[in-house]
Amino acid sequence: MSLVPEPDLLDLASETTTGAPGAPEPAGGEVADLGGLLRRGLRVFAENKLALVGVAIIVAAVLFSWVGPLLYHTNQTNAQEALLNSTQNAPPSGAHPLGTDENGFDILGRLMVGGQISLVVGFAAAAIASVVGALYGAVAGFFGGWIDAVMMRIVDAFLSIPVLFLAIVLAVIFRPSLPVFIFVIAFVSWLVPARLIRGETLSLRVREYVQAVRAMGGSRRRAILRHVIPNTIGTIIVNATFNVADAILLLAALGFIGLGVPAPQTDWGSMLSNGVNFALDGYWWEIFPAGLCIVLVVVAFNFIGDALRDALEVRLQHR
């Protein structure tokens, strides 16, 4: 009989659970590692001065468009009342810091109202396009074969049509309204996200964790929604940021050629279009403010998108 006492079963279980002294705990280590990657990505984003400038511009644009009308009250709906209380094409003055337009509307107040529509259309269209494009691309890439071929040929067919031309056709077919413009711009904006997510899905579908879901009897729907799309969220967010800028530019283009939101509503593109009619008369205040707003907001979203892409690349390098 051996004099060495046999280890108790509970002690063995405890040793198996805790592991060797000094060994990292898998669960805690993973959480800490994810937290470290997030902090590293945020640090990279914060080090990008242009990105911080972009965030400041977007915050200022949102406050200007929604808080501004609460502090600076103007009439932006009744043209007859505006003509009675102000002068057409009046230059900047104390009563009207940015002057008035051909209808007597205060341009500063007009910029606020136009900013609301431009930003709402930009955010809403980008969100819809990102969701639809991500789902479409994930399904095409995950199933592969003839399903992928057919779905992507549809995308290629739409991509072969100039975006502005397609948007003009849709804007002419449907009666102009805010929901219609969101739908039209989202319809021409989901194609690029679909191609991006499809490309990532082709590599994600052969990963071990996706194969494990299928081996354990998980459905394709669960694999796509719970494992494929969450692992492409970085690409989706970065592309959505650029989609907002593209949507604002496309709305401005439609407004510039006279297909913007119907009066008395307005957007920055429609304001720019109206101001160009008086360019030769020297009414600069009807052109530059709207154009400057478009340029600043679009450039700001591009700065943010570039910084998010850099932060994502840092996280991927340490994955």
Image (spheres, rainbow, N blue to C red):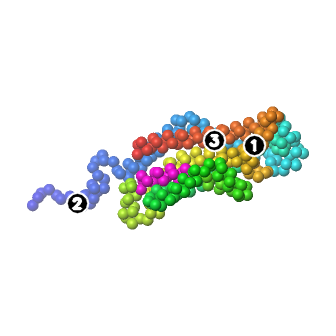
Q: Which numbered disc, 1 or 2, marks the residue that appears first in the sequence?
A: 2
Label number found at residue 273: 1
Foreground pick, 120 / 11: 120
Q: Splitting the image into 4 quarters, where does residue 270 fall?
A: top right
Q: Tell me the residue that label 3 is attached to.
A: 298
Is residue 194 visible in the rendered image? The answer is: yes
Real-space Cα distance between discs 1 and 3? 18 Å
Q: Nearer the viewer, mark 1 or mark 3?
A: 1
Residue beneath the point at 69% across and 45% down = 253
Amino acid at pointer 3: Val
Is residue 65 visible in the rendered image? The answer is: no
Which residues are drawn in magenta? Answer: 191-205
Q: Tell me the residue that label 2 is attached to.
A: 8
Q: Position of residue 59 (x, y in %)?
A: 64, 42
Amino acid at pointer 1: Ser
Instruction: Determine if the magenta segment contains residue 195.
Output: yes
Judged from this view, the residue extending furthest toward the left is 1
Residue beneath the point at 39% across and 55% down = 206
Amino acid at pointer 2: Asp
Q: Position of residue 27 (x, y in %)?
A: 38, 52
Q: Nearer the viewer, mark 1 or mark 2?
A: 1
Q: How many C-alpha atoms fall within 10 Å of the one at disc 3: few (<14), some, or many (≥20)? A: many
Element on which disc 2 rests: loop
Foreground pick, 184 / 9: 184
Q: How many C-alpha atoms fall within 10 Å of the one at disc 1: few (<14), some, or many (≥20)? A: many
Foreground pick, 289 / 256: 256
Instruction: Determine if the magenta segment contains residue 273.
Output: no
Q: Which numbered disc, 1 or 3, marks the residue that appears first in the sequence?
A: 1
Residue beneath the point at 56% across and 54% down = 157
